[in-house]
Amino acid sequence: MTEKTKELNYKTLIKKIAENGDLCVLGMKGTCKTTLLMHLARTIREDKQNRLIVFETFPKWIKEFDKIPFMVIKDSDVQEKENLPFLEENKSYIQWSKDFTISNAEDINEFLKTNKDCLFLIECEDMEKISAFMTFVIYQIYRKQYLRAKAGSLEAVNANYWFLCEEAYNLLDSTVLAKTTFSKLRKMQGEFRNLKMHLICVTLRLQSLSPKIRSTMSILCSRVSLDDYQLKVRNLLRNSEFRDIITELPKGEFIFPELDAKLKTEPFNQIGKPYEWKPKQTELIKQKPKEGLGMKYLTWLNNLVNHGNTETQTEQEETEDLEDSQGDALMTLNEKDILFPEDFPE
C-alpha cells in the first residue's frame, strides 16, 4: 500500500484485523462481499498457524470455495433443550429463555480436532438454532484457548482461530436471538483478541447488528444504503476522501476507514473442491457385520451370567450413552481432549 494510491491488499487487511480484533464487511447486495470473504479465507489459510472455521447457511461455499472439509448440520441436530423463565430488566412481566442441545456434539468435536480448516453448512430453519450452533462451536475453541492460556502454553502453541460468518444481520442481532445464547456469545467475543480468536462477518445493514457486538469491530465498507450512510457511515468517513462517493462505489471496491484506503477485489477462481467429512464412528457402523441369532443368544447368556439382570443394565447404559453424546452451547465434552489436540494434517 502506498500513500499516493492508498491501495490495500488482503494480507495487510488481515494483519490489521489481527491487531485490532474483528471485522465487519458492510455492503448492499451485488457488491462482491462473498467473493471478498473467499479471498480473505484463502489468504488466512496460507499461514500454517491460522485455523479457519466458516459458517454458511446457503450452499455456495461448498460449491465454489477451495478444497476444504465440510460438515452438514441438519435441523434435527440442534434441538430445543428447555424453557427457562426470567424477569426482563425494567419490565413487570416474565419472559421465557430458550436453550438448545447439540445432539451430534461428539462428531463436531472430532471434526474440529482432526481438521486444520473447517466449513459448516447449517441447514437449520430457525435463526435461533443457527446462532446456538455457532455459539457451541465457538465455545469449543474459546475453551481450548482459555485452557492453553491458563496452562501458560498459548504463545507456545501459537494457534490463531478465524471465524467467518455470512448473513450476520440475521445471526448476530440481539432482538432475534435467545437471551442465553446472545449473552454467551457476547461474553466470548469480548475476549477474542486476548485468546487469538477473530471474527469476520458480513452484513447488509450496519444497524441490524447488535451495537454490543459491532462496537468492537473494524468496518470495511462497500456501496451502502442511504439509511446506513445517514446514520453511521457519513460520520465514520467524515475525514476521508471517500466520504462523498461511498454510496456510488463500483462493484468489488471497498473502503477501510481506519487506514483511509481502498481495496479492490477480483473474481475468485476455485482451486480444488470442498469434500464432505464423515465421522469414523459412522464408517465403522457401516462396516460392522450383522450379528446372527446364535451370537445374540450367546451374548445375552454371557451378560446374564456375568452381570445379572441384563435389561436394567442395558437401559442404564443407553441412558449414559445418550447423556454423553449431547452437549449444549456452554459445555465442552472433555477439556483434557481439546487442550493439546493431535497435529493437524497438511
Image: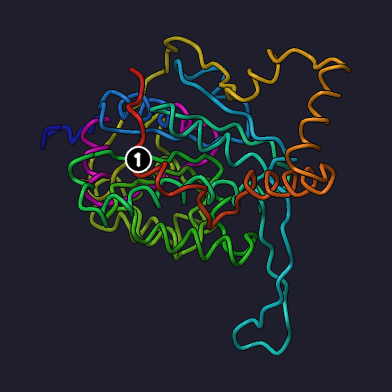
Which image quarter is the C terminus in?
top left
The amino acid beneath tag 1 is: Tyr
Asked if 338 appears above or below 92 in the picture, the reply is above
Q: Give above or below for 74 relative to 213.
A: above
Q: Position of residue 288 (x, y in %)?
A: 70, 15
In this view, the residue in front, 202 or 161, is 161
**Can you say whether 151 is above or below 266 in the image?**
below
Secondary structure found at label 1 = strand
Q: Quadrant of residue 57?
A: top right
Colour pattern: rainbow
Image coordinates of residue 210 in percent, x first then y, are: 50, 62
The relative height of residue 132 versus residue 298 in the rendered view (above or below) is below
- At horizontal 45% and vertical 15% (from top left) the residue drawn is 67
The image shows residue 44 at horizontal and vertical percentages of 31, 30
Which residue reaches farthest left?
3
Q: Position of residue 298 (x, y in %)?
A: 81, 23
| Residue 251 in sight from this viewpoint | no
Work out which residue is located at the far right of the displayed protein and give it.
293
Residue that mark 1 sits on: 161
Left or right? Give the position of 310 relative to 152: right
Q: Which residues are magenta?
A: 10-35
Residue farthest along the front direction in this orientation: 305
Residue found at the far top of this picture: 272
Question: Could you tell whether 277 is left or right of 191 in the image?
Answer: right
Tell me, yes or no, whether the highlighted magenta stretch contains residue 18: yes
- Graded by Cα atoms within 10 Å as few (under 14), some (14 to 19) or many (20 or more), the crowding at tag 1 reads many
| Magenta segment includes 56 | no
**Residue 189 visible here:** yes
Along the horizontal axis of the image, is 124 left or right of 266? right
Viewer-proximal residue among 158 and 288: 288
Quarter containing the N terminus: top left
